[in-house]
Amino acid sequence: MNLHRSIVVPLVFSATFLAGCGSSVDGRFTSGMVAMGAVAGSTVAAYPIGADGTIGAQPLAVTTSDASGAFSLPALDRWPALIRATHGAYVEEATGAAATLEGDGLEAVYASAPSTIVVSPYSSAVVATARAAGGLTQANIAAAIATISAFVGDFDPQQTRPATMAAGAAAPAIEPGHQMALALGAESQSRTDAAADIATSIAAIVAQAAAGDTLDTCHAGAGDPRADGTLAAPVSSGCAITRGAARYAANARNTSGVTSLASLSAARTSRASPDQTAAATPDACADRAALLAQNLALFDGRRDDVQANLVVGVTRDNWRTVTTRSTWGPTAAFYGTLATPAACADADTFARELVIAAENYWIDQGINYCHHHIPGWTPPDDSAAAAPRYRNSSAGSTSGASSNGMTCTAQRSGTGAQIVPGTAPSAGFSASEIQWNGVDCSDFTSWIYNFVGLTGVRLPTAIGSQACAANEGADALPTPGVLLDIDSGNIDAMLPALKPGDLLYITQVDPLASGSDAGGYQLAHVVTWTGKRWSDLQAGPDAARYALARLGQPGSRLGGDLAKYLPLADLATQNPWMIIDSHYAGPAYRPFVGWYRRSLSNVRRIVGADAARRDPALAPYVIAPIASDARGDTLTLASPHANASAQQGWRMIYRQSGGTPSCVRAGIAQ
């Protein structure tokens, strides 16, 4: 028998009415349910809440849930009220195991009479969020409902009953009830996987919601630039419930109708520019400079369209400056495709050159290195605060929204100028001067491929997923392209195989000192292969943008930190290959030498991925999963060339077990 059906059946229960508490006995009832899935035999009590947020000692009414978790309370005439459910038996959504509701049970809070009552871990998260804000006042209750509603999918989990289907079936259209069913399954999956209690699970919901995460997305990107010119791996943050949602979506017991986070993400993501056809004359098809010139108006239109995903609170009018819960700002909308123009017979060559043209376009916008998802969002100005969250340029702080860490570097001003190391102001620009628009390295590459409409699905912004995801095992979302085992050990021989637009992933300098991956190197950075040497830039039609005399000035495409990697006097003699990456003061050109080359881990090819898989010369270097743990939380990947096993050899270890996904290179480069 399915105990999780969401059919509302009129039921009449015997309720215990307590005299003198202001309860109403007039034949009107409010129906509800206790949901873990369905909690049977739970004691449900309603308590009055005073104007100061205190909870009355005596309940207004008490009743008991039936076998389907349903109950009915008399319509109260005193609001706000707290609903508390204690005890009862239920079946775990994730495992099918019998369980009992223990401890403090579950709570929900309502400022006014609801249409229905749903008591679940998510309503308990609403209560916990309001209490943390100072108590169960009207204002705190409203703010807490908004916070948890945004996490589950922009609906009120306290008034949305789960809508279920046959196990494994996909809903023809994802409605709030299906998302609520997925949310309940995600909580069960996360909690049972970790052998945690309900209180821990509620705390995880509260933390993720407060960070601005959603059920299908954790805010993630890359780490912070370091003084030595390298990049640190990002600090891990909690992602347990979202990870649980990904696992439950693939669970054979899933009755939510949401069969993948990709389908949920697509349903929740708005569109930016429509499908378009790029411009190109026959002689421009393989010329990035000409493509930029001929598509400048198209790029401007895409830039000025709504870059942000329009969820509750984010609109066409406010997306540029909206204050979001997360310091990362809004996530990106999906851009329409850019079709190959009829003049270009070689679609792959055109697409690669278009990628570089788009990267040059965004370099020319003068954006900074920021832990943001879209370049057009300006965070609120809290720079005068003792510990600013949104406008924090403190060097050496933790990345992203963790512990009020760095959000944008102090190395680029609003004019587009960069600080050249060794020149004033050595401490960086002041808060009023800093360019607060920008993206970090993995958000930049994700943004570019979205902006030119080449991926169909979003390239993950988390550096660990972008570097390691291969659509199997621990992957929560499909990821475009193919992974290639071109690394620091074989780059000299494999360099001719690289194509413009290929994404090269770089590890941090220091090996991991402890843990199961001790001795391995965590992925920290991504760069784009341009296929051009220094001399090519100097001889090109836009050579002025690469002039050393303009280093650090607005309009220069060179990183202001160029000399950290190669003495400027050696550029002409060594003639290095040049890459594009968001680093130091934002997207710019830098030489592929030093740390970049020594710490190269692997490559992701998006344009021409299928051809790479078929290429006899590249097929041995295609990276694919070779082992996984029982839950799929840890995936080991390697290429045939590496001849690795799950425990030995040159391999990649992709972990996604409740925190931000991480990717580690282990073994010795081949």
Image: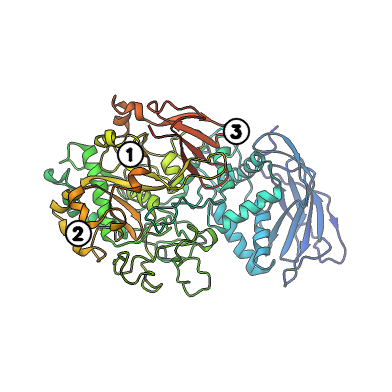
- First in sequence: mark 2 vs mark 3: 3
- First in sequence: mark 2 vs mark 1: 2
In the image, what residue occupies the spot 54% across and 61% down?
403
Name the one closer to the observer, 63 or 206: 206
Q: Secondary structure at mark 3?
A: loop
* Crowd band around label 2 with a 10 angstrom C-alpha radius: few (<14), some (14–19), many (20+): many
Location of residue 91 in the rendering, given as x and y in whole percent from the top left corner: 71, 37
Q: Foreground mark, 3 or 1?
A: 1
* Type of amino acid under label 3: Ala
Q: Secondary structure at mark 1?
A: loop
Name the one closer to the observer, 71 or 319: 319
Q: Quadrant of the N terminus?
A: top right
Q: Which residue corresponds to mark 1?
A: 606
Location of residue 584 in the rendering, given as x and y in whole percent from the top left corner: 36, 59
Location of residue 515 in the rendering, given as x and y in whole percent from the top left corner: 57, 42
Q: Is residue 29 above or below residue 112?
A: above
Q: Quadrant of the C terminus?
A: top left
- Tell me the distance, in whole angstroms, between the alpha carbons under discs 2 and 3: 60 Å
Label of residue 545 in the image: 2
- Tell me the distance, in whole angstroms, between the alpha carbons under discs 2 and 1: 28 Å
* Type of amino acid under label 2: Arg
- First in sequence: mark 3 vs mark 1: 3
Q: Secondary structure at mark 2?
A: helix
Position of 580 with respect to 135 (left or right) is left
Q: Which residue corresponds to mark 3?
A: 166
Q: Residue furthest right?
A: 19
Position of 222 with respect to 215 (left or right) is left
